[in-house]
Image (cartoon, helix red, strand yellow):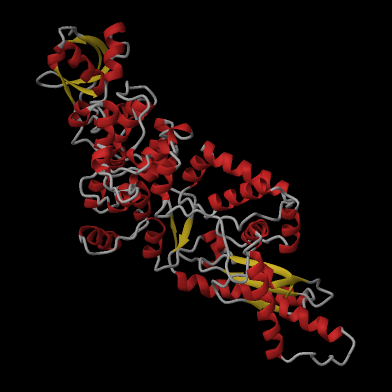
Amino acid sequence: MTLQHINIEDLTVSPLNVRKYGAKDCADLVTSIRALGVLQPLLVRETETGFEVIAGQRRLNACRILAEEGEGVPIPCMVMDESDDVTAIEASLAENIERLPMDEVDQFKAFAKLVKQGRTAPEIAHSFGITERMVTQRLALGQLHGPILTAYRKGDLHARDVQILTMATPKQQKEWWALVKDEESYVPTGQHLKDWLFGGAHIPVENALFDLEASALAVVSDLFGEEAYFADSVAFWQQQNEAIVQMMAQFKDAGWSEVIVMDIGAYFAIWDYRSTSKKDGGKVFITCSKQGEVTVHEGYISQAEAKRREKAKAPDAAKPAAELTKAAQTYVDLHRHAALQADLLQRSGTALRLLAAHMICGSSLWDVEADAKKAPKPEIASSLNANTSQQALDAETAGIEALLGLDAEDHLLARQGQWCPRPDLGEVYSKLKTLEDDTVLRILTLLMAQSLSVSSPLTDTLGIEVETDLSANWSPDNIFIDLIRDKQVLDGMIAELAGDAVAEANITETAKTKRTIIVDCLNSTRSPVDANWMPRYMTFPSGTYRDDQGSDAVKLAEEDQGEVIDVEAEAA
């Protein structure tokens, strides 16, 4: 290769240049080249009409921008042999992998060209210093149904769903795409897409009790994750059941009185059982999830059986006859209860403490639970945990638990929608009697805050009433922006953050590019129009960005003594 300085009008982008998307994003290079010049020569190849750029398309575009401003000069270029297509592709690919991340489809097409030229996946990985798994992932995209690949590139499909579809057969891919195109059909995504592909039973190979290699069962690998799944669930269950039978025999040989295999998908509710040793007649319970995961619970008997055993051990004694008939006892209970209820009406302090005690410990007539706050993704849960309001709620909860003398196994309310042990009602009430009314009110306030539903129709009304301002404890993060998929919404956010001109200039760009602009404004890579920007969704009342979204629920939240505020006008 030789170094030459070539006029910009003699340079064109080679069709072998692997970058098809992202080359226009060169603002950073314009500033650098204006100040320092082109530090890294372009890699070019001579043609009949001039030179074609194999690597350096972004630098070329930056130089063209400077030329339009009157700053054009010959560009330093390394001229390579015009006959070696494979070397040209490799050079372009290496250049782009090391710099601005390429579109995944561009990478796939480049790798596919190298494979056609005789390169293997390990060889490609070695050439560019990347993992063989990454090469395999990109090549897997080439097995996708064409329209699916095109939609993904436009940002219309979630990467997670496209990755799952690489495990699908060509027929399944076409059937799924037909559902996407049919507006009246349900389109499975995420975990439901896995269920749809594997007939409702996506069974990870790690759940097998038998020897996977010896079984010779077909396995489908998730190239974009760490899991692999059995292609034939029926064949899996045949071998898994045989392995469970062998496991039962081993426990029997070990001296357990009984081994019970529960129905597939049945849950072992540990609170319905009592821990019992092997010598005292404890049993082994084996559960198996619908995904084939086997769990062994050693040394238990049911609570009902434990009570029967206790009764059998008790000395025989004649049960004394009841002093009152059942009807008479009910008569007494009802009249005593009515008298107590009437007296409670005059004892608000006692009722206040009873209310708190029953909210904490539960009642046979009603129950109160904390909102589960279920986050569909780990990153959403992580973002919530970083919210200072959530941290304040957790701190207050811990403080009141300590105030009431609750230990680590007790909770003010059942947590995360799961069963949790409740403290003793009498003990909690006795503790509440020692506290001042203001402290009891503080406890009730926390319990109400914990049990306010995330989807409560009162959310907007309460937010307006207490003047909640999210900017005091939350700011837009990359996790939130990455969850926004609607292009019209993204355009509205760009207009607020970067201005109407930027939004209009990028109206045809992909959702991915639009999100990048928003993130750049948030981290000050771009200068935002509003440094204190808050998405409309995070205000009280909540706003919208799309014209077709109804706002009846929000308008109801704005009602104040019969007056309705125009929420859409306020949001604008």
Left or right? Give the position of 260 relative to 74. Answer: right
Left or right? Give the position of 345 relative to 427. Answer: left
Nearest to the observer: residue 208 or residue 184:
184
Q: Position of residue 440 (x, y in %)?
A: 66, 50
The residue that appears at 47% across and 55% down in the rendered structure is 453
Q: Is residue 4 above or below residue 378?
A: above
Q: Is residue 456 above or below residue 69?
A: below
Q: Position of residue 303 (x, y in %)?
A: 72, 76
Q: Position of residue 55 (x, y in %)?
A: 27, 23
Q: Quadrant of the N terminus?
A: top left
Q: Position of residue 225 (x, y in %)?
A: 46, 49
Q: Quadrant of the C terminus?
A: top left
The residue that appears at 81% across and 73% down in the rendered structure is 278
The residue that appears at 55% across and 74% down in the rendered structure is 264
Left or right? Give the position of 347 relative to 237. Answer: right
Q: Is residue 5 above or below residue 363?
A: above
- From where the camera sits, is residue 154 visible? no
Q: Is residue 103 above or below residue 308?
A: above
- From where the camera sits, is residue 276 visible? yes
Residue 132, picture quadrant: top left
